[in-house]
Image: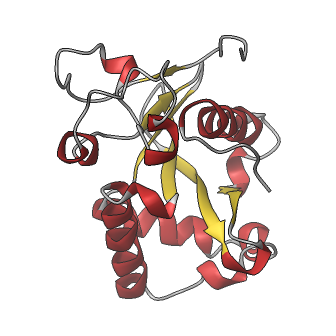
Amino acid sequence: PRPTRPYRVQTAEVVANHEARALTNCYPQALGNPENPCNSITTSQRRSMKHELITDRLVLRELRTTDAEVLRRICTQPFVLKWMPDWEMPLPELEKLIEWYMWCYANPGSMRIMLALTLKQDGKMIGLVGTGRKPEVDDDVELMYFIDEDFGRQGYMSEAAKALADHALDCLGVDHLI
């Protein structure tokens, strides 16, 4: 078994009388595991769950359409565009992309989970971390991330990436990430 992680997974509601920590991200790949506490949760209940990971300093939460302006400011920084040039887009296009990610939360087979990287102390959004299938690499699941340059080199991204990577490996039925 994998060691206990230094973060906790939460959801906004308790479904079918299970503890909240056992409910988040119960994907079909993990449902065949008899030790998975999510086996008794229905597909409709699973689709209503919220994605949230909490670390010592961060809250990784689902994107909201209201995040678009802050996300666009971060995405247009040369620090981010150097590695993620396709994220530079007009605000209406970014809002539609966020809506698509919101659709993906309810359709777990895509493995597309994009989470806002926010500071635990004040909720300020400072970046993005996510997973998704890469068709050009045998449909493997990748881990992607970027952070506001003002918050770089402080260990936030390492903390967020580790939490999501561990969560994907422990809870989503993924056996490796690229």
Q: Residue at x 28, y 39 (%)?
A: 49
Q: How is the image coloured?
A: secondary structure
Q: Name the one closer to the observer, 41 or 54.
A: 41
Q: Position of residue 152 (x, y in %)?
A: 76, 47
How many numbered marks, from 0 up? Answer: 0
Relative vertical location of residue 131 with respect to residue 164 in this rendering, above or below: below
Q: Compared to 54, does 101 lie above or below?
A: below
| Side of 33 where 161 appears, left or right | right
User: For the C terminus, which image quadrant?
Assistant: bottom right
Q: Position of residue 146 (x, y in %)?
A: 68, 58
Residue sitting at x 40%, y 65%: 101
Q: Is residue 174 above or below residue 145?
A: above
Q: Position of residue 75 (x, y in %)?
A: 60, 71
Q: Position of residue 58 (x, y in %)?
A: 55, 30
Q: Left or right: 176 with respect to 30?
A: right
Quarter of the image where one finds residue 159: top right
When asked about the image quadrant of residue 57, the answer is top right
Q: Is residue 126 left or right of residue 156?
A: left
Q: Nearer the viewer, residue 85 or 13?
A: 13
Indicate the quadrant containing the N terminus: top left, top right, bottom left or bottom right: top right
Eyeballing the image, is 55 above or below 75?
above
Q: Is residue 118 left or right of residue 42?
A: right
Q: Which residue does the image show at 26% across and 48% down from the upper left?
A: 47
